[in-house]
Amino acid sequence: MTILSLNECDLVWESASPEETQRAGEILGGLLRPGDVVALLGELGSGKTVLVRGIAEGMGCAAGDVHSPSFTLINEYEGSADRPLAGGRSCLAHMDLYRVTSEDEVLGIGWDHYVRAPFVVAVEWAERALGWLPRDHLRVRLETLEGCRRRLCVQATGPRSAQVVRAWMTVGNFSIEAI
């Protein structure tokens, strides 16, 4: 299947297990660089944190330290020295907006500090901050299927995120479909 523009379509594939979802995140984490924002959407228990755990691992962070920051809203993870980004260690800002009740609250949690600083940002419950997301970001919607299966729906919103998605699909060798 040939896809002419990732900005105009969604890509979909299924994960058979949490381990497979985490592995997809690990591949993605290895491709991200400071300034990239990954907006994660999906119901409670759909695998957003599992995907972020993989992103962290791919960036050289301790994946076992990654947990949903529902009460703190933001956790920072520093990558290993052997996976430096932008002249220093890689840094992942993991945001969880579950407890944010309106878009008006987003700026009060330090949003600008993270999306403008040298961080890779993964935002769970990103639908609560759609108006604040940078123009070019990667959207990943996770859907719960039966058992441990998950559907990942991926959308690039600009040239950088399209570049990331192309590389993610190539490296991951996912069986994808365009919708």
Image (cartoon, rainbow, N blue to C red):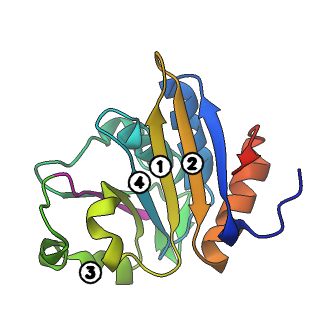
Q: CA distance from mark 3 to mark 4?
A: 19 Å
Q: In the image, which is nearer the foreground, mark 3 or mark 1?
A: 1
Residue mark closest to the camera, 1 vs 4? 1
**For marks 3 and 4 on the same chain, the one whose residue lies earlier in the sequence:** 4
The overriding secondary structure of the stretch rendered in magenta is: strand
Q: Quadrant of residue 24?
A: top right
Identified by mark 4, the residue type is: Leu
Residue bearing mark 4: 40
Can you see residue 38?
yes
Q: Earlier in the sequence, mark 3 or mark 1?
A: 3
User: What secondary structure is found at the residue carrying circle 2?
Assistant: strand
Callout 3–callout 2 Cβ contact below 8 Å:
no
**Real-space CA distance between mark 4 and mark 2, rounded to the nearest whole angstrom:** 10 Å
Horizontal side of residue 8 vs 101, given as left or right: right
Q: Which residue is mark 1?
A: 141
**Residue range of the region highlighted in magenta in the rendering:** 90-98
Picture coordinates of residue 17, whole percent (x, y): 53, 22
Query: Any magenta on residue 95?
Result: yes
- Measured along the vertical axis of the image, is residue 87 above or below residue 8? below
Which label sits in the foreground, 3 or 2?
Answer: 2
Q: Earlier in the sequence, mark 2 or mark 1?
A: 1
Q: In whole angstroms, how far apart are the C-alphas of marks 3 and 1?
A: 25 Å
Disc 1 is placed on an element classified as: strand
Q: Are marks 2 and 1 in contact (CB under 8 Å)?
A: yes
Q: Is residue 142 magenta?
A: no
Q: Is residue 129 above or below residue 26?
A: below
Please state which amino acid type lies under the numbered disc 2: Cys
- Residue tagged 2: 153
